[in-house]
Image (cartoon, rainbow, N blue to C red):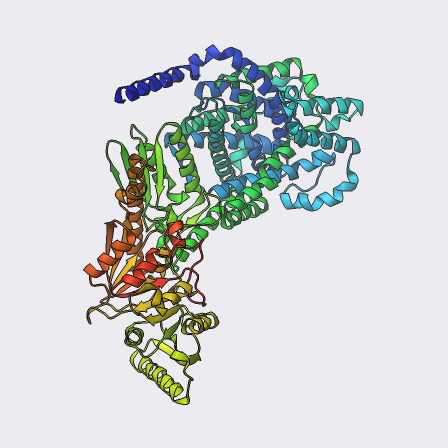
């Protein structure tokens, strides 16, 4: 058997090696795929023409500059690029930045401003080279994903706004976003019908063509179809030349614009604007470039991994070269890259062939380019803007949590009102405030000391052996410290078959960006045959049903004086006296309200007389007096005298008064004869069944935990109540033995399967106990806390440990994790309550009063 497995493993390794040899590579080796790349380059060039022209138009630059920058990128990228099927060129995302920079630097003169902006582009390229040397590409991961999404959406809105004049054929006076929005209603009366018709038809085609299931039509890029249709419509309507693309006849004489460094640096008042423009171009170019190559890597048929630093280097050099001949900023484009993959492109040489075809078009077909209506290019950019800012983006961000939507919305509003740099900073600041809010919510108090931890290494320790590695995390795990997490995860990927990430109880928050990375990391490792497990996330509450939504550790709700009510059921018996003493000697939340109740239930049909009523009243009055005099934590104490069946009357009282806790004495250990047992099964609140204490010294409390929402609520109730300083807590979790299952189902389970699952349960139980210890230590600091992980049946284990440790009180949830056991008589809570030799409190999940209680979602398990 072992020899066969080894042979299969060797064969898989050989197949993997053969596949690796067939994976297309860049450089000279990639030239062998020239047939595929040449065809893909032709298709990409047909898409590049309208995109490049439209982006230049939207940037406020001459249309020819879009094509020249695309050509520069194509000639440089194959020799430097760190990506494989990514196509680089002018970026729609940077068009609003360039447009505003041209206006600012040129003081409203677009021609002068553009020559100065080419100098800014060169400076941005130099900064990118410096960042490459510093290996700063990885820092793009620390920016909140919602802020980046908001930045892209705001770019989409600005793209749409700036294309409206070309879309309707009427120039606007305003240049900023809100000014153009306000001017739009006034400009409707000046619409050019033919231009508007062409633009509308082109935009409709861009939305409809991808939805048509026509195989031959789907092989043609929609942008190319739109250009062809628009040229035909323009010829049919004899469209005026002022609504068509303008390309110089002599490209060398009039198509190249050199930077005006003298004008750029001669005016000291422009220094601030230059710095802002350089930083904004560098930031947006860098973040969008890295986001694009990551997206393209996911759809690469060969799943090749791009190099962020190498890509940043290529972008820096390309931007410098592009600026010297008047080109725009260069960035990888998702539309052209997707077209490259769908057209069969194999390597980065597609960029080179794309550039060659563009040169051919400019030389041999410039007349056709001049026939393209600007309304068609506006439609292409409006469609891109819709993809960046459409309802689908809002739905996605909303699905990941309302706090993500807030960051997204703040980034958009600030960006369109000011600029991209201020907008992204506003988004980051909003994210920091929200993270502090949830950290404070988890801690139960606001503390600025938690802020620095969001920038510190969350990896507490690393343990490894031959087959597995364990990464223990503590503190917040958020985007701002994600570089540590990414580095640790990448270093953990080796010959090991298992990577375990254990989130300790001190991890109070894990944000959307970190969870998105971990999910992607899991998927990548799964394809490589590596198992990645995330342990300890069950105790965190998600902000939405989406797996990657922000998760925080729900706080324990403080018990208020208005929230805690106790019903004490007495009947004059010895167990009843013990229950009264238990209530009198217990430290309760301040001003706890106690209702002492007794039921007159005469045997053999005897009639209740005034004498009986007086005796019963004396009984409850004595209990009331004792409670008032002996326990300062008890506030209001009242008595109630009932008549009838004890179970029914107490049950009705519980429904009417809605207490948090019913306290009653224990009767005989015969299960079906005890009233306390019946109340335990029917009460809609927590129930404590009292038995004598073993010692007059400090109280010993045993807390049963199993990871369910029921035990989570029991832990919360214990942690939130006041306890004497000498109280000792024993947190217990029991894991059944394999033999327990085999004894009942000998032929149903596989032993190996049981062992694997039991090991997982042991690991989970250890984490649950550690979490409970941390919670009790923070809420009951003067107590002694120990944890016990025991083997065997939970009922037997809890009863045996309680007797062994002379426990005074057992606290456990009203039901366990096993669904079947919750439905049958004999559940853990019921069995322990009946057979224990000490007091037992069974905590109900849903609190019936306004005091403590958690719902299923916030229970944390």
Above or below for 123 versus 820: above
Q: Position of residue 292 (x, y in %)?
A: 50, 31
Q: Position of residue 336 (x, y in %)?
A: 56, 25
Instruction: Please name whichever residue, 826 or 49, is drawn nearer the observer in this view of the structure.
Output: 826
Q: Determine which quarter of the picture holds residue 575.
A: bottom left
Residue at image coords 79%, 41%:
189
Whether residue 708 is visible to the viewer of this picture, yes or no, is yes
Q: Determine which quarter of the picture holds residue 569.
A: bottom left
Instruction: Please name whichever residue, 128 or 764, is drawn nearer the observer in this view of the structure.
Output: 764
Task: Report the number of discs.
Answer: 0
Viewed as shown, does residue 550 lie left or right of 487?
Answer: right
Above or below for 475 versus 669: above
Furthest toward the front, the residue is 604
Viewed as shown, does residue 631 lie left or right of 107?
Answer: left
Q: Position of residue 249 (x, y in %)?
A: 67, 18
Furthest toward the bottom, the residue is 611
Viewed as shown, does residue 251 lie left or right of 288?
Answer: right
Above or below for 708 versus 212: below
Residue at image coords 42%, 48%:
551
Q: Position of residue 399 (x, y in %)?
A: 53, 45
Residue at image coords 41%, 71%:
647
Q: Determine which quarter of the picture holds residue 42.
A: top right
Whether residue 457 is visible to the viewer of this picture, yes or no, is no
Instruction: Please name whichever residue, 844 or 556, is drawn nearer the observer in this view of the structure.
Output: 844
Instruction: Please name whichever residue, 131 or 535, is drawn nearer the observer in this view of the structure.
Output: 535
- Which quadrant would the N terminus be assigned to in this image? top left
């Amino acid at each position: 058997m072992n020899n066969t497995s080894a042979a299969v493993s060797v064969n898989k390794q050989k197949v993997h090696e053969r596949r690796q040899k067939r994976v297309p590579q860049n450089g000279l080796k990639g030239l062998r795929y020239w047939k595929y790349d040449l065809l893909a380059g032709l298709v990409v060039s047909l898409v590049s023409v309208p995109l490049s022209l439209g982006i230049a138009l939207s940037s406020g630059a001459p249309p020819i500059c879009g094509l020249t920058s695309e050509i520069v990128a194509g000639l440089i990228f194959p020799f430097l690029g760190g990506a494989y099927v990514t196509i680089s060129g002018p970026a729609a995302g940077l068009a609003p930045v360039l447009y505003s920079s041209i206006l600012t630097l040129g003081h409203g003169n677009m021609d002068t401003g553009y020559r100065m902006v080419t100098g800014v582009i060169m400076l941005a390229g130099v900064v990118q080279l410096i960042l490459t040397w510093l290996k700063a590409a990885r820092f793009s991961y620390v920016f909140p994903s919602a802020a980046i999404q908001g930045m892209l959406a705001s770019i989409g809105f600005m793209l749409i706004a700036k294309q409206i004049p070309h879309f309707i054929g009427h120039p606007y006076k305003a240049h900023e976003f809100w000014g153009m929005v306000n001017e739009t209603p006034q400009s409707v009366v000046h619409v050019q019908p033919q231009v508007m018709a062409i633009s509308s038809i082109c935009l409709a085609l861009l939305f409809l063509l991808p939805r048509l299931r026509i195989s031959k039509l789907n092989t043609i890029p929609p942008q190319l179809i739109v250009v062809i249709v628009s040229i035909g419509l323009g010829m049919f309507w004899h469209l005026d030349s002022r609504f068509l693309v303008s390309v110089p006849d002599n490209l060398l004489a009039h198509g190249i614009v050199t930077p005006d460094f003298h004008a750029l640096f001669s005016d000291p008042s422009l220094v601030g604007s230059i710095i802002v423009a350089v930083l904004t171009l560098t930031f947006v170019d860098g973040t969008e470039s890295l986001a694009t190559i990551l997206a393209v890597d996911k759809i690469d048929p060969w799943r090749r991994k791009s190099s962020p630093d190498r890509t940043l280097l290529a972008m820096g050099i390309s931007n410098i070269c592009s600026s010297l001949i008047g080109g725009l900023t260069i960035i990888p484009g998702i539309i052209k890259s997707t077209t490259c993959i769908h057209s069969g492109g194999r390597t980065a040489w597609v960029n080179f062939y794309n550039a060659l075809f563009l040169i051919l078009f400019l030389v041999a077909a410039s007349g056709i380019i001049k026939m393209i209506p600007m309304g068609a290019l506006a439609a292409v950019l409006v469609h891109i803007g819709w993809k960046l800012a459409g309802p689908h983006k809002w739905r996605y961000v909303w699905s990941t949590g309302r706090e993500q939507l807030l960051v997204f919305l703040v980034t958009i509003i600030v960006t369109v009102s000011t600029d991209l740099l201020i907008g992204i900073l506003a988004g980051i600041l909003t994210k920091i405030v929200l993270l502090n809010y949830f950290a404070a919510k988890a801690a139960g108090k606001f503390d600025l000391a938690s802020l620095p931890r969001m920038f510190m290494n969350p990896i507490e320790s690393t343990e490894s052996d031959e087959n597995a590695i364990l990464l223990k995390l503590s503190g917040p795990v958020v985007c701002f410290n994600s570089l540590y997490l990414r580095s640790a995860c990448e270093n953990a990927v080796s010959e090991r078959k298992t990577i375990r990430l254990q989130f300790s109880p001190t991890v109070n928050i894990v944000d959307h960006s970190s969870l998105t990375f971990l999910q992607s990391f899991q998927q990548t490792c799964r394809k490589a045959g590596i198992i990645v497990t995330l342990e300890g996330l069950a105790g965190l509450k998600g902000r939405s049903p989406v797996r990657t939504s922000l998760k925080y550790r729900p706080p324990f709700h403080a018990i208020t004086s208005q929230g805690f009510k106790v019903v004490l059921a007495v009947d004059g018996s010895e167990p009843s006296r013990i229950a009264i003493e238990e209530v009198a000697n217990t430290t309760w939340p301040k001003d706890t309200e106690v209702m002492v109740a007794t039921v007159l239930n005469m045997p053999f049909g005897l009639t209740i007389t005034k004498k009986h009523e007086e005796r019963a009243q004396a009984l409850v009055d004595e209990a009331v007096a004792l409670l008032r005099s002996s326990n300062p934590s008890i506030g209001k104490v009242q008595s109630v005298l009932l008549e009838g069946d004890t179970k029914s009357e107490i049950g009705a009282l519980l429904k009417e008064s809605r207490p948090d806790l019913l306290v009653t004495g224990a009767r005989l250990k015969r299960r079906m004869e005890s009233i306390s047992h019946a109340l335990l099964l029917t009460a809609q609140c927590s129930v404590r069944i009292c038995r004598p204490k073993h010692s007059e010294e400090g109280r010993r409390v045993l807390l049963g935990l199993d990871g369910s929402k029921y035990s989570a609520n029991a832990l919360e109730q214990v942690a939130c109540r006041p306890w004497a300083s000498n109280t000792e807590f024993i947190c217990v979790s029991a894991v059944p033995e394999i033999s327990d299952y085999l004894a009942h189902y000998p032929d149903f389970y596989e032993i190996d399967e049981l062992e694997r699952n039991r090991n997982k349960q042991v690991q989970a139980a250890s984490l649950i106990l550690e979490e409970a210890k941390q919670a009790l230590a923070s809420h009951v600091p003067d107590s002694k806390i120990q944890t016990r992980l025991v083997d065997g049946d939970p009922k037997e284990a809890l009863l045996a440990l309680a007797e062994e440790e002379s426990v005074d009180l057992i606290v456990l949830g009203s039901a366990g994790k096993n669904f079947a056991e919750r439905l049958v008589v004999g559940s853990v809570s019921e069995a322990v309550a009946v057979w224990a030799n000490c007091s037992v409190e069974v905590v109900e999940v849903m609190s019936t009063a306004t005091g403590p209680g958690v719902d299923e979602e916030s229970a944390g398990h």
